[in-house]
Amino acid sequence: MDKTYQPESIERRWYDRWEADQRFSPAGHGAPYSIMIPPPNVTGSLHMGHAFQDTLMDTLIRFKRMQGNNTLWQVGTDHAGIATQMLVERKLQHETGQSRHDLGREAFTDKIWEWKQESGGHITRQLRRMGASVDWTRERFTMDDGFYKAVQEVFIRLYNDDLIYRGKRLVNWDPTLHTAISDLEVENKEQQGQFWHFRYPLADGVTTADGADHLVVATTRPETLLGDTCVAVNPADERYASLVGAFIELPLVGRRIPVVADEHAEMDKGSGCVKITPAHDFNDYAVGKRHDMPLINVFSKDAAILSQAEVFSMSGAPRTDIDTTLPKAYQGLGRFDAREKLVADMDAKGLLVKVETITNTLPYGDRSGDVIEPLLTDQWFVAVEELAKPAIAAVENGDIQFVPKSYENMYFAWMRDLQDWCISRQLWWGHRIPAWYDEAGAIYVGRSEADVREQHGLGDDVTLTQDDDVLDTWFSSGLWTFGTLGWPEKTPELETFHPTSTLVTGFDIIFFWVARMIMMTLKFTDQVPFKTVYVHGLVRDSQGQKMSKSKGNVLDPIDLIDGIELDTLLDKRTGNMMQPQKAKAIAKATKAEFPDGIEPHGTDALRYTFLSLASTGRDIKFDMGRLDGYRNFCNKLWNAARYVLMNTEGEDTGLKGGDVVLSLADRWIISRLQQVETQVTKALDEYRFDHASQALYDFIWNEYCDWYLELSKPVLWDEDASHSAKRGTRRTLVRVLETVLRLAHPMMPFITEEIWQRIAPLAGAEGDSIMVQPWPEADDHRLDAEATQSIEWLKGVIIAVRNIRAEKNIAPGKALDVLLTKGTASDQAQLEANRRFLTKLAKLNSAQWLDTPEDAPLSATQLVGQMEVLVPMADLIDKDKELARLDKDIQKQQGLITGTEKKLGNEGFLAKAPASVVEKEQAKLSEFKDTLAALEAQRDKISAL
């Protein structure tokens, strides 16, 4: 083995070997255990959240594989509709100056497939760097042919069961991308905003209780005034009780709108009156629905003011009974220009009461960066009420369990307040909705146009046009557990590995993905998608801040593995910024945190760091100090293996039989190994990755390396030790290390495989890879309480001697004489039994028992239980120098006593000082005298040496 651990030289080599040997495929025997990887975006790069999550999944799958399970870790990527379309659009614009509209839909989607073939594998290459033992032979893509068939089948069946419908509803609309987006793709940002307070004139001469001829409403979006349909007041608000049913004349527009009573209006907020725009606000939509108000849309797809409003009933049917005229002055203006003009016009009319500066949040599209607009559009929806009931029951009855259990409450809260799910997106890249329209607008759903014509008896004279929209990415990923296994066909994989065993996911997508998978899978397979949902926290920086490009605190896991120079790191953090003005501050902070860039740490150290931080459900503060520490841990394990090999290769390790005598240390480490095997197994079974990694770390570093390897030397290096004793210690060295490597393998796959290949033959282990070795199982018959007690006694004495050396600045190599006294008969017996170990490891000339403690010479002392460990000081100190130091200390103490006695003898002080101050001085005097007595006694002892 190389002198130093060089992860870069072994990691790629071993991964390529495992993959070539098909180590990641199911074994074909044993109880099935399967995990579905949450499919990362095909456009993506591995971020810290991916790396963390993939480490947990790989640890589980390697653990279960070694336990003899038939394991499948299903891998795949998501087509990522918006992200992929944007990326290829930008690439096309940069390279050719063309837009997707210049190419047309078919040619543009061909370009995306070309990009996918060339560049779409970046994240899968990074997964390999993390050591992910996924079954690459079964890699799936949410747009591959088989998955497309599953998505299409689900849509058609839901439509035929009246669980999918098309309707006009409010959605999050991105005016830049011209598509609806999900809540997860909306980023709410806090900002300084304005609250405009307007007068809305009452119609028909009606006045308020205090005689006002208007109501005051406040809004953060004045431009939506053009689409107002009513003003709401609280039904319990006596100020406005007489106005319910009266009308307002909507300023600038002239439309008569009613005053309605609704709980949405809060009496103590502003004037207590709220303008209601059902077509442009989600809360207002709910109010409008309760009062059967019309929906008046005033925005185009670009969020500009229309030339004429669009008016619909709550059912989405056009209404012709309402004037759709909009003021000419605003037509065609973008929403923010319209806002500015409208506020100025209201002010000119004397209808602006005041403008209030407030802190509020604005929704932004996470891809476009544009402000999201609630917009009334025709979309496809899944009716979720019936789908939700069995999904709730599955968690209630324990068919699906959340770890930690507290996340069940979050799941239930969302599932019991579900809104129908908007599944259409106005994109070109994705699963195109399998619906066709005739010229009259009738809808036909089927697998293809030919299928539709055959089902409905439509001849070639009927023109059919396919819906332009595609399905939300979450719709296809909702089928992930069964679609990847071949559904709707009844495949052997589906039969074997579904339901899957464990889902590992962040809490932020419980709503968007986990719940929808449960609903869809129960509907189409009558099975739960998974039996356990392990929910982890989010990976944040060391200060607990979310990692983001704008904060300049993003860490790339590959940089932590391979290292990165400072200049390259600065380029990554400050290049292509949305807010370039932050670059200088980010560069300064980066230089302060990483003045020399980031050193390489290797994959195993990064994985172990993640596991150590994986406490249940809490957000993770990533700590570079821990990463450095676990790189040192890898080095420690490497060096331990080198020591073992140097003392066992070419030697008798008991493989050919022969008598074996186990030393006390051998018996102890074997006993402790049984306990650690139990601890690690229990922790992994309970998803306590932090406990598993800590238990193994403590055993390897503190017990095997720091103690057992040292305790092996008195046997191995003793020329008088018997062959059977040396054989016993060598056998124990290699067998315990081989077992520890198997325990550590799921967490640190690369270093364990590399060392195991050298250790396994010496330990009698057979096989080509540690990956397929059996998981260690504890044997209670090998627990040895007597050996444990003896070694703990021995460790206590050795630590006591080491502490004395440190306190007295005694060289580590200087041999000492040690006395033990004031102990029990058991202590005395331990000394007799373990004197050889003790003298060797504590570097002693002698270790003797002192029956009469009062005869002890001047010594440095440490306690081990009730027993005293004494190191006589006669030969260890410079007598003249020590006496001079003590004389100086005695003189100082005498001065303190004289000064305090003088103060306490002053009658003026005693008369004026509070009693508590006098008592404090008296206590100090007593303390000074005690210290002086101790110093004088110590001087007498040293004088007598």
Image (tube, rainbow, N blue to C red):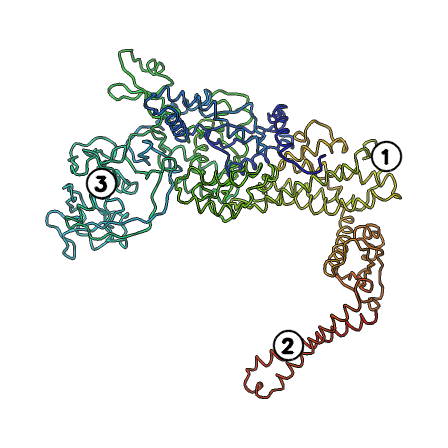
Percent coordinates x, y for residue 513 in the rendering: 44, 34
Residues packed near mark 2 inside 10 Å, few (<14), some (14 to 19) or many (20 plus): some
Determine which of the numbered discs, if any, sits on residue 658 in the image. Answer: 1
Residue at the outermost bottom position: 907
The reply to whether dot 1 and dot 2 touch (C-beta < 8 Å) is: no
- Please name which of the two marks, 3 or 1, marks the residue nearer to the observer: 3
Residue at the outermost top position: 460
For the residues marked 1 and 2, what is the alpha-carbon distance in whole angstroms? 71 Å
- x 37%, y 39%: residue: 186
For the residues marked 3 and 1, what is the alpha-carbon distance in whole angstroms? 94 Å
Using the image, determine if residue 606 lies above or below residue 875: above
Residues packed near mark 3 inside 10 Å, few (<14), some (14 to 19) or many (20 plus): many
Which amino acid, by three-letter code, is at mark 2? Lys
Residue that numbered label 3 is attached to: 338
Name the quadrant of the N terminus.
top right
Helix, strand or loop at mark 2:
helix
